[in-house]
Image (spheres, rainbow, N blue to C red):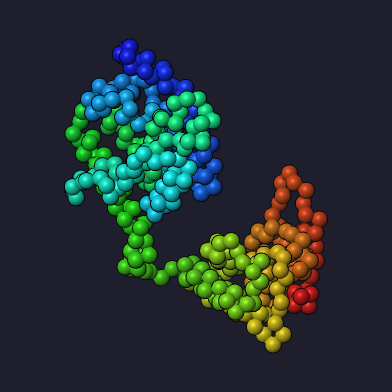
């Protein structure tokens, strides 16, 4: 496409400014997005795209062009939008903002309605750069992960296609309706899940029991804060996997998990309560309970990561199936298959 000469000249004059703005916005927003696990994508508008936009007749002057540089911040759900908008207002000078609630839309219409923030560099940032940088308006779209997926899939298929097809536009709108429905369910996840009919499932029941009873031990001050797992759900899943390694009957899984928890509670609430060490992990303690000769469990079919804490603090010096540190030096204190397992109860070392 041959762009009009006037557009070429105007574009060439601002292109260095656009690059300056892109560099500064990237340096400001990319670390922020990385820290919060948001996706960040950006682009400079091409001269061909700009010429086509101007040909549409909706823009009356060069000063109204507001997306020579644009970026998108992808957040998990709409509840994250407000925090992003506060970040933008603190980092740049806002020119205008168009949110979901500002877009007039008939109830039967489904189209893009994500937040669009327009602004310029703040005076101190602009003063340190070439003249004119502070006057260039840029756009930041804030969309959810589902919206971004919809945009990515449909934009080129529909809006940049070489034909006009009612059916394609209809399908794109239907997909947007599905995205909106998913986000409504996510936004009301707790209340929506309460009306889902539950079915019994041993793994889920066992996991819930482990979390509930271990958290009660935490509330009662029997588990040191340093042993609290990063994720109670992951911890409980690991305990369930351990129990399943020696109790293969799914229908007896919940009972076996409860029996293991009974031993833990007897340790920590008994007449001579076990005082857990502050180092190591809570799961290592659970492993040590299963490893005892007087408990119902067994480690014969479960892979355990050998560690100094497991051997020194809990007396587990033999692991039938130790995790192999391929290519790495094995822990010097780790037990290996064939070594005698210590029969010492960890309560004697606490």
In the rendered image, the vertical position of residue 185 relative to residue 131, given as above or below: below
Question: At 74% across and 59% down in the image, what residue appears?
Answer: 307
Q: Quadrant of the C terminus?
A: bottom right
Question: At 65% across and 67% down in the image, what residue appears?
Answer: 227
Q: Position of residue 112 (x, y in %)?
A: 29, 41
Left or right of residue 253: residue 346:
right
Q: Quadrant of the N terminus?
A: top left
Question: At 28% across and 50% down in the image, what residue appears?
Answer: 101
Quarter of the image for residue 54 reads top left
Quarter of the image for residue 321 reads bottom right
**Residue closer to the observer: 183 or 273:** 183
Residue 148 seen in the current view:
no
Q: Position of residue 317 (x, y in %)?
A: 77, 65
**Residue closer to the observer: 142 or 347:** 142
In the rendered image, the vertical position of residue 257 relative to residue 164, given as above or below: below
Question: At 43% across and 49% down in the image, what residue appears?
Answer: 86
Q: Position of residue 261 (x, y in %)?
A: 59, 76
Number of residue marks? 0
In the rendered image, the vertical position of residue 4 relative to residue 130, given as above or below: above
Q: Position of residue 273 (x, y in %)?
A: 70, 82
**Residue closer to the observer: 121 or 258:** 121
Quarter of the image for residue 190 reads bottom left
Residue 83 seen in the current view:
yes
Left or right of residue 189: residue 297:
right
């Amino acid at each position: 496409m041959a762009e009009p000469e006037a557009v070429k000249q105007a574009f060439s004059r601002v292109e260095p400014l656009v690059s300056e703005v892109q560099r500064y916005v990237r340096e400001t927003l990319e670390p922020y997005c990385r820290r919060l696990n948001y996706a960040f994508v950006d682009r400079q508008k091409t001269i061909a795209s700009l010429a086509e936009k101007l040909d549409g007749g909706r823009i009356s002057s060069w000063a109204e062009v507001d997306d020579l540089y644009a970026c998108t911040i992808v957040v998990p759900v709409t509840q994250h939008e407000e925090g992003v908008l506060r970040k933008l207002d603190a980092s740049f000078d806002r020119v205008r903002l168009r949110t979901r609630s500002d877009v007039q839309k008939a109830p039967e219409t489904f189209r893009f309605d994500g937040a669009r923030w327009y602004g310029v560099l703040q005076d101190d940032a602009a003063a340190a750069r070439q003249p004119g940088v502070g006057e260039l308006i840029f756009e930041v779209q804030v969309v959810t992960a589902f919206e971004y997926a919809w945009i990515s899939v449909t934009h080129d298929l529909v809006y940049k296609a070489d034909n006009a097809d009612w059916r394609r536009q209809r399908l794109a709108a239907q997909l947007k309706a599905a995205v909106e429905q998913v986000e409504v369910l996510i936004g009301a996840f707790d209340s929506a899940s309460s009306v889902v009919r539950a079915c019994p499932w041993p793994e889920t029941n066992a996991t819930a029991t482990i979390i509930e009873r271990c958290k009660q031990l935490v509330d009662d001050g029997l588990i040191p804060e340093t042993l609290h797992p990063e994720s109670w759900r992951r911890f409980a899943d690991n305990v369930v996997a351990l129990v399943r390694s020696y109790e293969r009957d799914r229908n007896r899984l919940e009972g076996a998990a409860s029996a293991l928890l009974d031993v833990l509670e007897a340790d920590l609430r008994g007449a001579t309560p076990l005082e857990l060490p502050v180092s190591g992990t809570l799961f290592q303690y659970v492993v040590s309970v299963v490893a005892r000769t007087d408990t119902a469990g067994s480690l014969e079919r479960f892979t355990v990561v050998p560690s100094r804490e497991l051997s020194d603090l809990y007396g587990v010096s033999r692991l039938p199936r130790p995790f192999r540190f391929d290519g790495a030096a094995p822990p010097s204190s780790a037990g290996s298959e064939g070594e005698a397992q210590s029969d010492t109860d960890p309560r004697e070392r606490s």
